[in-house]
């Protein structure tokens, strides 16, 4: 039994019927690539043989009576793999559009909190004998790093690997929490909540440091609540739309080398170009720049040794008001540099430190009111969207024995920010997943297609610059 940290628990408190806080991934498997035979039952059996290596996949959330404290993780004594792994057939004609629609339906369904907070949907009927797997985890149970670590136990560097059966005592172990003890512990821990008071002077000091930076014209993060309003900055519905596309990682590296910037700068510029084109085509492009929220992993820098989610956030300008892609790239690179410096002033644990004092009932009721009264539309826009850039392994991987042809990640969308773009670089590819509130972002596939126009414009400029620096031939 382990108590959730405040940050992990906050993803439970902030979830509503329309703001679903789970993360998804679409894996495209190609059994024919290495001659492996696919059978649904064999795939599920192999997953079952590996679950003991990932204890988090067998634990569920147990609420403390009267929400006197954050919930605890307990091993599910009634765990049944059949409740978590489902099998579907792709509707005709079985193309990428049908697959995206099916993934969107899965992403728009809430998870059963009485069971471990994950699901896998195996989708058959793709062209060429390929198979899709949609994995779905609640954000309380994974972040980018922990999710990748969990997936590592389900993947191998070669095809057809089969694990032995797990020890019986590991497979059957379970926790039985005593609610009376949990309630008593919750009451005993209440005085510790007053530690929040000590956070105030620390936070004021950090904010003072940020003000001094701004006065010295050192620059910094984009300011929340200053983003322009777009059609997707409204209250979200429970309906989702999905789009995905793959680009060449080598193109991104060529652009990086040509302009002396970082990979993340190029990725943000590519996404910014796609957003600009999509909004301009719909005559909805704001005159001022969009602001993106960028999750930042703190696993290596956090002083906290507990918890799943170790993440902070920085805000950055996307300069979507700049037409020239090279100028936009330069501005984004400088904005990212300043934002990271300012983020260091706040500290890696700023979000985790405050989240541990999150009162369960207050947060839950406040979020329901925020959703019901559509308050996201009544205050300035905090940020326009979330963009995540996740580095992955640069070699072929095999999921439960079958080669991964592509892996598209999808994060949650929020009230006031109904669009999320997550980018994964793996095995020479850039797999980009778009997820949005369906009513707020129509024709999401057009945004995904615009990614390639954005890359092409940057590549053209990069190649032109390279040619101009080449010595003349005599």
Image: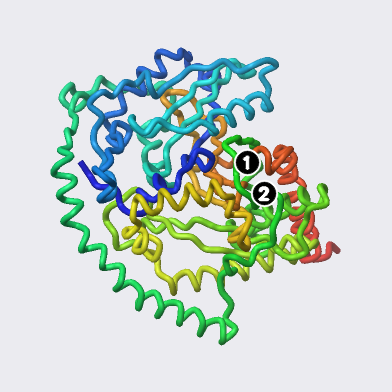
Residue at position x 44%, y 48% in the image: 14
- Res 465 seen here: no
| Residue 76 coordinates in the image, percent (x, y) | 26, 29
Q: In this figure, which residue is indicated by the disc labeled 2?
A: 232
Query: Is 278 situated above or below 315?
Result: above
| Residue 305 coordinates in the image, percent (x, y) | 27, 56
Mark 2 closeness class: few <14, some 14–19, many ≥20 residues within 10 Å: many
Label annotation for residue 239 = none
Q: Secondary structure at mark 2?
A: loop
Q: Where the N terminus falls, by quadrant?
A: top left
| Residue 166 coordinates in the image, percent (x, y) | 23, 23
Q: CA distance from mark 1 to mark 2?
A: 8 Å
- Work out which residue is located at the far bottom of the displayed protein and give it: 216
Residue at position x 34%, y 63% in the image: 353
Residue at position x 52%, y 82% in the image: 213
Mark 1 closeness class: few <14, some 14–19, many ≥20 residues within 10 Å: many
Specify the color scheme.
rainbow
Q: Secondary structure at mark 1?
A: strand
- Work out which residue is located at the far right of the displayed protein and give it: 474
- Res 112 seen here: yes
The answer to whether the residue labelled 1 contacts the one labelled 2, judged by CB atoms less than 8 Å apart, is yes
| Residue 195 coordinates in the image, percent (x, y) | 26, 68
In-image side of 374 versus 356 (left or right): right
Query: Is 52 situated above or below 209?
Result: above
Query: Is 89 situated above or below 349?
Result: above
Q: Nearer the viewer, residue 418 or 372?
A: 372
Query: Is 181 situated above or below 211?
Result: above
Label annotation for residue 437 = 1
């Amino acid at each position: 039994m382990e108590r959730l940290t405040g940050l992990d628990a906050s993803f439970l408190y902030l979830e509503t019927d329309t703001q679903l806080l789970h993360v998804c991934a679409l894996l495209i498997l190609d059994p024919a690539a290495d001659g492996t035979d696919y059978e649904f039952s064999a795939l599920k059996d192999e997953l079952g043989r590996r679950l003991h290596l990932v204890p988090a996949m067998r634990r569920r959330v147990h609420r403390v009576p009267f929400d006197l404290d954050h919930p605890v993780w307990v091993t599910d004594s009634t765990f049944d793999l059949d409740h978590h792994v489902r099998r579907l057939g792709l509707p005709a004609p079985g193309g990428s559009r049908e697959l995206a629609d099916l993934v969107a339906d899965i992403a728009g369904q809430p998870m059963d909190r009485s069971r471990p907070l994950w699901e896998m949907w195996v989708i058959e009927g793709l062209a060429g004998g390929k198979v899709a797997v949609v994995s779905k985890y609640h954000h309380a149970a994974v972040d980018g790093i922990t999710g990748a670590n969990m997936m590592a136990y389900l993947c191998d560097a070669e095809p057809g690997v089969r694990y032995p059966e797990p020890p019986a005592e590991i497979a059957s172990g379970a926790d039985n929490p005593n609610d009376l003890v949990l309630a008593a512990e919750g009451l005993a821990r209440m005085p510790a909540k007053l530690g929040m008071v000590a956070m105030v002077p620390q936070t004021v000091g950090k904010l003072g440091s940020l003000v001094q930076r701004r006065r010295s014209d050192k620059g910094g993060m984009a300011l929340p609540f200053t983003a322009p309003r777009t059609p997707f900055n409204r209250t979200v519905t429970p309906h989702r739309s999905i789009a995905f596309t793959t680009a060449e990682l080598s193109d991104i590296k060529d652009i990086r080398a040509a302009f002396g910037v970082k990979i993340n700068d190029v990725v943000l510029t590519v996404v910014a170009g796609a957003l600009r084109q999509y909004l301009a085509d719909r005559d909805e492009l704001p005159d001022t720049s969009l602001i993106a929220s960028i999750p930042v992993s703190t696993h290596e820098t956090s002083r906290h040794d507990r918890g799943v989610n170790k993440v902070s956030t920085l805000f950055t300008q996307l300069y979507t008001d700049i037409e020239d892609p090279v100028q936009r790239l330069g501005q984004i690179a400088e904005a990212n540099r300043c934002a990271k410096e300012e983020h260091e002033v706040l500290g890696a644990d700023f979000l985790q430190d405050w989240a541990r004092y999150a009162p369960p009932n207050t947060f839950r009721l406040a979020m329901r009111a925020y959703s019901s009264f559509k308050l996201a539309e009544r205050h300035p826009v905090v940020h326009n969207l979330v963009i995540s850039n996740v580095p992955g392994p640069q070699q072929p991987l095999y999921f439960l024995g079958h080669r991964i042809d592509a892996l598209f990640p999808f994060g949650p969308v929020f009230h006031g920010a109904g669009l999320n773009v997550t980018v994964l670089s793996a095995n020479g590819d850039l797999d980009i997943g778009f997820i949005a509130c369906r009513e707020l972002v129509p024709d999401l596939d057009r945004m995904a297609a615009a990614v390639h126009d954005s890359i092409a414009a940057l590549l053209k400029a990069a190649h032109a610059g390279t040619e101009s620096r080449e010595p003349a031939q005599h």
